[in-house]
Image: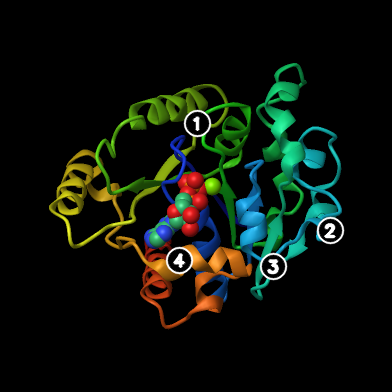
Amino acid sequence: MARIISVANQKGGVGKTTTTVNLGACLAFEGKKVLLVDIDAQGNATSGVGIRKPDVVKDIYDVLVNEESIEEAILPSSREGLDIVPATIQLAGAEIELTSMMARESRLKSALEEIRDRYDFILIDCPPSLGHLTINAFTASDSILIPVQCEYYALEGLSQLLNTVRLVQKHFNPGLKIEGVLLTMYDARTNLGAEVVEEVRRYFQENVYDTIIPRNIRLSEAPSHGLSIIDYDPSSRGAQVYLALAKEVLAREK
Ligand code: ADP
Ligand code: MG
């Protein structure tokens, strides 16, 4: 039975998609069977693992809104052991359409139940908002991985995120946990980076991963080649740190 983890933070550009794709690829590299679920209309996780628009037969919109079978939406990625349920721009309409639908919070949960026993991990790449799509992800998940960018106001907005977690725990998913807080885009050359690390550790304590993701140019180049970092440049610092994160996630599971 797969562990289902949402990668979420309503701030854009904090490293959600980079983390979903590369943690997923590194877990697959470690021999795990992994499914990514792209629920951001930007479709960056989808293109990031090598899926082009013509490859997409059905996407997550068809699953959530039209209640089509998730099985038919699953595609293999450029990395062995890593599959994806893609998103396309049609998902942009889902936030509004879900508002008036039956069981709008639990549609993703119901869909994932069909295929959960085929994977070890299911990672959901959330959009930069706390709307119906993110609520669906939290309702379907065992836990939430929160990437936090090492910059000014790093903690800003996180109380809103934690409020949403509490609401979902109360109404839809009492077992929902914080998987971990991941510091991203760390720059060792500035004092700011170190200050943010200290501040986030003070606030989230042992929930913060020991692995810190530095800024690494290879991580930003890989998506335009449709490859995860371990397929694009396995010797890069980016590949090393995401492999270390995968090992930490696996060790914490035990
Ligand atoms: P989000 O999904 O939270 O919006 P992304 O993962 O798309 O964030 O990251 C935002 C941008 O920063 C992307 O262009 C991505 O390639 C880049 N990026 C993410 N993490 C790193 C990193 N550790 N080093 C360098 N660039 C990064
Ligand atoms: Mg993203």
* Quadrant where the C terminus is found in the figure: bottom left
Dots 3 and 1: beta carbons under 8 Å? no
Position of residue 115 measured from the top left corner of the image (x, y, whole percent): 74, 54
Determine the secondary structure under disc 2.
helix
Q: Which circle, 4 or 3, is nearer the viewer?
A: 4
SS type, badge 4: helix
Q: CA distance from mark 1 to mark 4?
A: 35 Å
Q: Earlier in the sequence, mark 4 or mark 2?
A: 2
Q: From the top left corner, tell me how far across and down residue 151 is, in percent.
A: 27, 45
For disc 3, the neighbor class at 10 Å (few under 14, some 14 to 19, many from 20) is many
**Left of 229 or right of it: where is 98?**
right
- Which amino acid is tagged 1? Pro
- Label pair 2/3, CB-CB below 8 angstroms: no
Q: Which residue is mark 1?
A: 174
Label 3 element class = loop
**Residue receiving disc 3:** 77
Of callouts 3 and 1, the N-terminal one: 3
Dot 1: element: loop
Q: Is residue 172 left or right of residue 62?
A: left
Residue at the farthest bottom position: 235
Q: Quadrant of residue 205?
A: top left
Q: Label 2: how many residues lie within 10 Å, few (<14), some (14-19) or many (20+)?
A: few
Image coordinates for residue 102, horizontal then vertical, percent:
77, 21
Q: Is residue 67 above or below residue 150?
A: above
**Residue bearing the label numbered 4:** 219
User: In the rendered view, would you say 234 is above or below 107?
Assistant: below
Residue sitting at x 46%, y 34%: 10
Asked if disc 2 is less than 8 Å from ligand 2, the answer is no
Q: Is mark 4 within 8 Å of ligand 1?
A: yes
| Residue denoted by label 2 | 54
- Residue type, label 4: Leu
**Could you tell me if residue 65 is visible in this image?**
yes
